[in-house]
Image (spheres, rainbow, N blue to C red):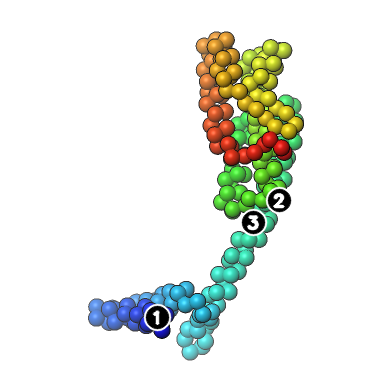
Amino acid sequence: MKNFIETILIMFIPQIILIYLGKSYQIMIVCLVCSTIACAFLQDKVNILRLGKNGIELDMREAINEAYATIDNIKELMDPIINYNLQLMAGEDLAFEGTNLEERLTFFRKARKLAEKLNIDTPELKATLAKARGSVLYAFSLKLYDLWGHDTNGYNISKEIIEIKTDSNKVHLDKFKHYMEELDVNSRKRAEKLYDELVEFLNETSDIDDSNY
């Protein structure tokens, strides 16, 4: 009964107002069509709208269900695509032919944002994000290596600040700050910028568990 009253109000109140205001029949027809569609969404039992003498039919529920099915299909397709591309990035030989830090950061963030928009949260994706996070940290470590020089000292410092292991990664920001004091003014500015980027990345990926990937 409630739905019936709502339908009557939606269908006819706007028409009465338009008649009172002296609006043209074209406007009234458009308003009637809009009211009819509104009723279709409010009525759980309404599946098909029939408009006009020729019996034009609009299967609203089926269209909505198909739209949701399409979204689900997109999710199913994008999950392996995102996984595959993140795996490729994680497996690159960064030192010789892989993407650099800036490129990895950009792709990692875009891939994760896309997964969040599509509400993809599979165990496979979580594991892949953990690997990809490690690959970004590895790119950070090479930047540290550049800052402190391509020698044993620079290599050891980068390893102390960012520990890259097969089963986990650790970042020691306190050591980063300590070793920055050794740099000249220009190098220190670059190090401070890199430090801020690293902190930002660690904060935005704090929910990713890479302790056992």
Residue 2 numbered tag: 1
Q: x, y percentage for residue 194?
A: 56, 24
Q: Residues within 10 Å of mark 3 (few under 14, many from 20)?
A: some
Q: Say whether residue 11 is visible.
A: no
Placement of the N terminus among the 4 image quadrants: bottom left
For the point 35% across and 80% down, the residue is: 9
Compared with 191, 182 (above or below) is above
SS of the residue under disc 2: helix
Mark 1–mark 3 Cα distance, whole angstroms, equals 38 Å
SS of the residue under disc 3: helix
Reading the image, the residue beneath label 3 is 75
> Which marked residue is nearer to the observer: mark 1 or mark 3?
1
Reading the image, the residue beneath label 2 is 80
Given the image, on which type of amino acid does mark 1 rest? Lys
SS of the residue under disc 1: helix
Q: x, y percentage for residue 136?
A: 65, 32
Given the image, on which type of amino acid does mark 3 rest? Lys
